[in-house]
Amino acid sequence: MVAAALLLLALIFWQSERRWLGDLYCFDQPGQVWGLASIPADLQPECPASASYRQEVRERLGRVEQFRVSGWQPKALLPVFTEAGYIPQTDDLLSNDYSAFLARGAERIQYSAVRQGPETLITVSGPPAPR
């Protein structure tokens, strides 16, 4: 009985820790953009490789999701957010980067895109998701 309980506790611990060991640790809801909609097929999800980002997300001090898409498509994910009720507060497009602050009620998030060679890296960041 004790061995079964210890095994169950170890399994629960492994399940909760597995997220932090994986490459897509930053996604609260795998396969989703900010928990709003499925990730479009032409976008590749990723998370910052930085250990400090990983720790910040793990400690629920912040939230970040990243997506890579072919070509220069800085606004590729904006429709996901606007359809979910986010309103762009800023809209700043420069030659190799794009930045916008989006608001929905009291929630504020930052949406940014940078050109990286033949691709666009889109980063969405903000406060941690409510639990």
Image (cartoon, rainbow, N blue to C red):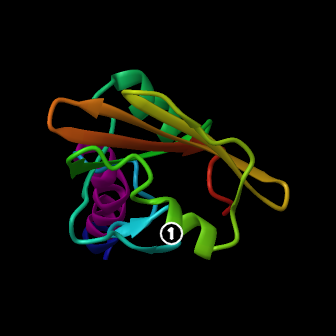
Q: Mark 1 points at which residue?
A: 80
Q: Quadrant of the C terminus?
A: bottom right
Is 33 rendered above or below residue 72? Answer: below
Residue at 31% across, 62% down: 15
Is 90 rendered above or below residue 11? Answer: above
Expressed as whole percent of the image width and height from the top left, the position of residue 63 reads 54, 44
Q: Which residue lies furthest to the right in this view?
A: 106
Expressed as whole percent of the image width and height from the top left, the position of residue 81 reads 57, 65
Numbered marks: total? 1
Does residue 8 belong to the magenta stretch? yes
Q: In which quarter of the image is the N terminus?
A: bottom left
Residue in the foreground of this view, choosing between 67 and 98? 98
Is 64 rendered above or below residue 103? Answer: above
Residue in the foreground of this view, choosing between 127 and 78? 78
Residue 38: quarter of image: bottom left
Residue at 39% across, 58% down: 76
Considering the numbered disc 1 on the image, is that residue within a helix, a strand or a loop?
helix
Horizontal side of residue 124 vs 3, given as left or right: right
Residue at 35% across, 56% down: 13
Horizontal side of residue 45 vs 127, given as left or right: left
Expressed as whole percent of the image width and height from the top left, the position of residue 128 reads 62, 48
Amino acid at dot 1: Val
State the extent of the magenta-drawn residues as a range.
6-22
